């Protein structure tokens, strides 16, 4: 069985230029690089740090983002370049950081390695293609202007929403784009035609994209509580997470005393994925209904996930748990 690095190398055409895509919005991926600022020559600093040629991706003027936070490409020296392994390790570390604390965390972590791509285009042409793909293009009425595809989670969600074929139809002579998904799998999109076709999302598709942050956080927390999603086909995860996130928003409206912030919602959504029957259990509903007292206000839901998991697990085993409303403890 090929390692991920061998798999990544095996998909590289040694005769076609190879790049790694970087999203520096929340900082640079290399240790010690710090964060470039608008007053510095970001390209020169990056070329010095990476030891490779840098290709800036200049975003459209309508995207209100400082130039030093625009994505960029690092040109690699073929499939045996040690930076290929380094950037794969960074990408995997980012993925694991988001998942590491499970329901005790927030499902957040910077994802600065956007993937590895190959193209025979002149570098400026490649940058222009990527810049165009990062402009929001939708039938929906929205103030959003930036589709942050250099964050590979956005690319992965776009593939779910629009399908791999429609996403890859934009590539033209961008021959391939490989990236690491939330499961730690390498996914690779390949161009189907040298003529790029713009991708325009319907209003419904854009609404799916707008839920991206909550979906990614929920999936990361869920994965942090499982063995890399063991037993769940990856293609079913987004639909399950979409239902769970929608139901969490409804729960937050019904029990505002338990849902103080977005983490309460993602914890509830992840718990719903882990224990699908949990939201209907009487003991769970009793716990959510409990408004506490003036001296002991109710705890936010994010601090109750162990109690909720215990109720769901015991219910699954055939036990009947109830909540003592005076003490808040569980009993059979």
Image (cartoon, rainbow, N blue to C red):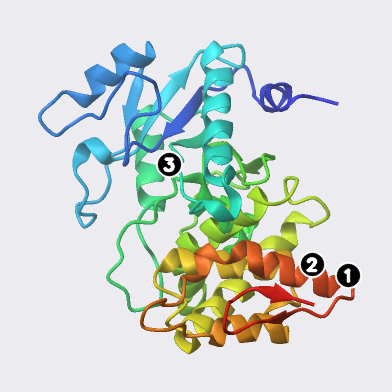
The picture places residue 70, in percent across and down from the top left corner, at 29, 40
| Depth check, front residue: 130 or 325 | 325
The picture places residue 45, in percent across and down from the top left corner, at 24, 18
Q: Residue 311: name its quadrant.
A: bottom right
51 to 143, vertically: above or below: above
Element at label 1: loop
Local crowd size for mark 2, using a 10 Å CA cut-off: few (<14), some (14–19), many (≥20):
some
Residue 199 in sight? no
Q: Which residue is mark 3?
A: 110
Mark nearest the camera among 1 and 3 is: 1
The earlier-in-sequence mark between 1 and 3 is: 3
Residue occupying image coordinates x 49% and y 56%: 197
Asked whether disc 2 touches disc 1, contact meaning CB atoms under 8 Å apart, the reply is yes
Element at label 3: loop
Residue 318 in sight? yes
Q: Which residue is mark 1?
A: 317
Mark 2 and mark 1: Cα distance apart in space: 6 Å
| Depth check, front residue: 243 or 267 | 267
Q: Which residue is mark 2?
A: 313
Residue lying furthest left: 39
The picture places residue 214, in percent across and down from the top left corner, at 49, 64
The earlier-in-sequence mark between 3 and 2 is: 3
The picture places residue 173, in percent across and down from the top left corner, at 52, 38
Which quadrant holds the C terminus?
A: bottom right
Mark 3 and mark 2: Cα distance apart in space: 33 Å
Q: With 127 as the anchor, is 96 left or right in this view?
A: right
Local crowd size for mark 1, using a 10 Å CA cut-off: few (<14), some (14–19), many (≥20):
few
């Amino acid at each position: 069985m090929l390692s991920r690095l061998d798999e990544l190398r095996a998909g590289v055409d040694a005769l076609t230029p190879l790049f790694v895509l970087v999203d520096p919005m929340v900082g640079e991926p290399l240790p010690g690089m710090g964060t470039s600022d608008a007053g510095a020559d970001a390209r020169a600093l990056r070329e010095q740090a990476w030891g490779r040629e840098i290709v800036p991706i200049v975003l459209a003027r309508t995207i209100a983002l400082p130039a030093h936070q625009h994505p960029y490409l690092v040109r690699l020296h073929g499939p045996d370049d040690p930076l290929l392994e380094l950037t794969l390790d960074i990408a995997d570390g980012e993925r694991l950081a988001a998942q590491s604390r499970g329901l005790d965390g927030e499902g957040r972590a910077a994802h600065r390695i956007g993937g590895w791509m190959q193209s025979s285009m002149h570098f400026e042409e490649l940058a222009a293609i990527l810049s165009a793909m990062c402009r929001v293009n939708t039938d929906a009425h929205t103030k959003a202007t930036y589709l942050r595809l250099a964050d590979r989670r956005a690319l992965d969600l776009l593939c779910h929403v629009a399908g791999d074929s429609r996403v890859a139809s934009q590539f033209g002579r961008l021959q391939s784009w490989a990236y690491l998904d939330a499961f730690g799998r390498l996914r690779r999109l390949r161009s189907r035609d040298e003529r790029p076709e713009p991708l325009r999302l319907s209003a419904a598709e854009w609404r799916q994209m707008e839920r991206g942050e909550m979906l990614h956080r929920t999936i990361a927390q869920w994965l942090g509580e499982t063995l890399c999603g063991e037993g769940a086909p990856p293609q079913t995860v987004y639909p399950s997470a979409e239902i769970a996130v929608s139901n969490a928003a409804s729960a937050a409206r019904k029990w505002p005393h338990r849902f103080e912030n977005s983490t309460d919602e993602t914890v509830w959504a992840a718990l719903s994925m882990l224990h699908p029957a949990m939201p209907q259990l009487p003991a769970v509903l009793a716990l959510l209904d409990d408004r506490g007292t003036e001296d002991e206000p109710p705890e936010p839901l994010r601090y109750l996930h162990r109690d909720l998991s215990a109720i769901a697990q015991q219910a699954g085993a055939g036990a009947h748990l109830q909540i003592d409303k005076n003490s808040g403890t569980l009993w059979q």
